[in-house]
Image (tube, grey):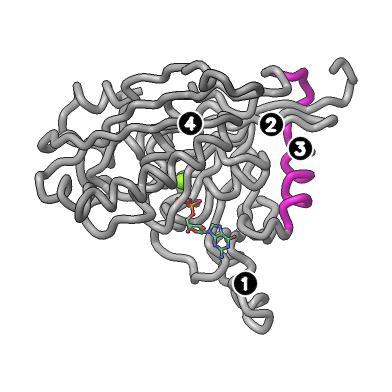
Amino acid sequence: MDSADHHSGFVAFIGRPNVGKSTLVNQLVGKKVAITSPVAQTTRNRLRAILTTPEAQIVLVDTPGIHKPHHLLGERLVKSARAAIGEVDLVLLLLEGCEPPGRGDAFIVDLLRQQKLPVLVALNKWDCVAEQHQDQAEEAYRELLADAPWPLLRCSATNGEGCTELLDTLVERLPLGPQLYPPEMVSDQPERVLLAELIREQVLLHTREEVPHSVAVSIDRIEEMPAPRGRSGGKERTAVLATVLVERKSQKGILIGKGGSMLKTIGQGARLQMQTLIDGPVYLELFVKVVPDWRSKPARLAELGYGSN
Ligand code: GDP
Ligand code: MG
């Protein structure tokens, strides 16, 4: 791509937990590269998703939501979101259109005002705002942004409404430049991280309360297995061995479930998602292990990829 008007660059997706940052990344890229869930703090790693169009290549930096830290893991999440702001050409500030602005939003707006970066604001979840409340909802957010010279758009990350316009506006504001990654690349994360995240997503979907935040997943082995013998056209299978870490014995019990039923549900859900990602059959084996207090242990955090940088 050597066209003189090709744009490229990095966009950080910033916003409170649960506003839909990861859902929007997937919607724009058209593939599931970031896991999402109704539980706040789903995203733990900074993830770069890559979107290549004829006019531009945009690297979308999905960040953990900015919030007040409560323990070591929380602190690292906030640090990583702040660091992302320092590395990008543009910030997309995502706000929750269907809720009034809160103190968390004001905190982020202040943080962004102190930077010199161009900012684009999108009111997400617009599908949830009743038509008669739309003007009022937008007005409340315009007040929050006050005199900041940032364009304000509306979108829905789940049904795609407003996303084409959002993408065009992003591209216009990116610097001119060549492709930075091969066009077929959709994420900068190694396969094992994407696979581990798909397992964690199923845990978040199927468990409640104290379990979700206490869970980490490590992929122990990925192996290509030959196609079953005697079947022509049989495809190679990918075997994935993974361990789900929890902090307490009671959580291990919940994850395994009666007669192993919960672990089976989680495994089946994850396996289906993995097959779509890998584009071939997957054999998945899951183990559950108790590591008391892993979230507060720097060595464990580093091992699991939640490093200090
Ligand atoms: P993040 O923490 O900002 O990354 O938020 P997620 O992408 O994980 O989304 C949090 C929740 O909001 C999930 O249950 C999503 O399905 C939901 N969600 C995200 N975007 C939209 C949207 O545009 N409309 C609606 N109705 N729900 C959304
Ligand atoms: Mg997220």
For residue 62, side relative to residue 7 (left or right): left
Amino acid identity at mark 1:
Glu
Residue 136 screen position, x and y as percent: 62, 78
Q: Are marks 3 and 2 in contact (CB under 8 Å)?
A: yes
Residue furthest toward the bottom?
Answer: 132
Neighbourhood count class around disc 3 (C-alpha, 10 Å): few under 14, some 14–19, many 20 upward: many
Looking at the rendering, the stretch of residues picked out in magenta corresponds to 162-180
Q: Is residue 84 above or below residue 182?
A: below
Q: Which mark is residue 171?
A: 3
Neighbourhood count class around disc 4 (C-alpha, 10 Å): few under 14, some 14–19, many 20 upward: many
Residue 68 screen position, x and y as percent: 30, 49
Amino acid identity at mark 2:
Ile
Q: Secondary structure at mark 2?
A: strand
For label 3, being within 8 Å of ligand 1 is answered no
Residue 75 screen position, x and y as percent: 28, 38
Q: Which mark is residue 58?
A: 2
